[in-house]
Image: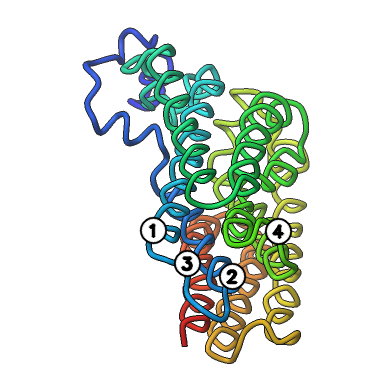
Amino acid sequence: MDQASVISQMAPAQLSSVATWKDYFILTKPTISLLVVVTVVPAILMAAPIALPSMILFTAVLIGTWLASSSAAIFNHLVDSDIDQQMVRTSRRPVASGRISNTKAAGFAIVLGALSFGILWKFATLNSALIAVAANFFYVVVYTAYLKRRTVQNIVIGGAAGAVGPLIGWAAIDGTVGWPAWVLFAVIFMWTPPHFWALALKYKDDYAKAKVPMMPCVKGDASTKLQMFLYTLTLIPLVVSLYWFGHAGLIYLVPSLLLTLYFSYLAGRLYFSGTNQLAMPLFHYSCLYLFGIFGSLMIDCLL
């Protein structure tokens, strides 16, 4: 029996140790939370095209969004702890391993969520705070507690929760949500399945063991890879539409279109390769993809 198998079969008490600040930081899923924050910035700039918002407002929206995403991530650790304990990839997470108790994790999540709502309401708008709360409810209750365990379309539907950054950013400026924010929402929504299914291809045995109906476990590798490729193709018109309808310029269009075409190329190459060896390169690229899209849009807005 290999080391990974031994670890996966150990009880949480056997894996537990004294929690550190790093464990609490890990609970917030910092990479995901940072990505959500990045998606907020262009929406703020696009919603205020005449004059830049004040630094107080700008900073408050970013902090409020980060706290909201972190709160949702912690609740995700709580709800998924039984699944995490069965998977080698996640068995050492702070709650699953027992380093942080359910009570402490729940308290941490509630505090961060309350701070997020208060900051967004006080310094931005009530609508932006309500959108953040609604997204957290959808992610924790609808996706994590229900969809993830019951349908192969779990990550497709659940991806809506991770796509609300642009909606929060736009609503923080004038309380409404403009059409370009919904386009950015759609970009993230369509990006999520190929991003997550690339990881699911590698760890499908883990998901199968935990009885999570991820696409590769239910529909097979070939069907999953074909859908990943098709989802990347839908990103092309979405990315171009912001330029086509005059909401962004060439500084945004050129790099974003090239990044999207390469994303589709990688997904197509994975599908036609007949193996899963290219799944993780696609996953790693997809992590950088959104940073590139939203980063180029931010620069375009500023210039």
> Dot 3 corresponds to which residue?
291
Disc 1 to disc 4: CB gap under 8 Å: no
Relative to 51, say whether 210 is above or below: above
> Could you tell me how far apart the alpha carbons at marks 4 and 2 are, in whole angstroms?
37 Å
Give the mark nearer the N terminus: 4 vs 3: 4
Give the mark nearer the N terminus: 3 vs 2: 2
> Could you tell me how far apart the alpha carbons at marks 2 and 1 are, in whole angstroms?
41 Å
> Dot 4 corresponds to which residue?
176
Disc 4 to disc 2: CB gap under 8 Å: no
Question: The residue under label 2 is which amino acid type?
Answer: Leu
Graded by Cα atoms within 10 Å as few (under 14), some (14 to 19) or many (20 or more), the crowding at tag 4 reads some
Question: The residue under label 1 is which amino acid type?
Answer: Ile
Percent of width and height locating residue 197: 63, 49
- What's the residue at 50%, 42% (across, down)? 69
To which quarter of the image does residue 154 belong? top right
> Dot 2 corresponds to which residue?
266
Give the mark nearer the N terminus: 2 vs 1: 1
Q: Given this view, does label 3 or label 2 mark the residue nearer the observer?
A: 3
> Dot 1 corresponds to which residue?
56
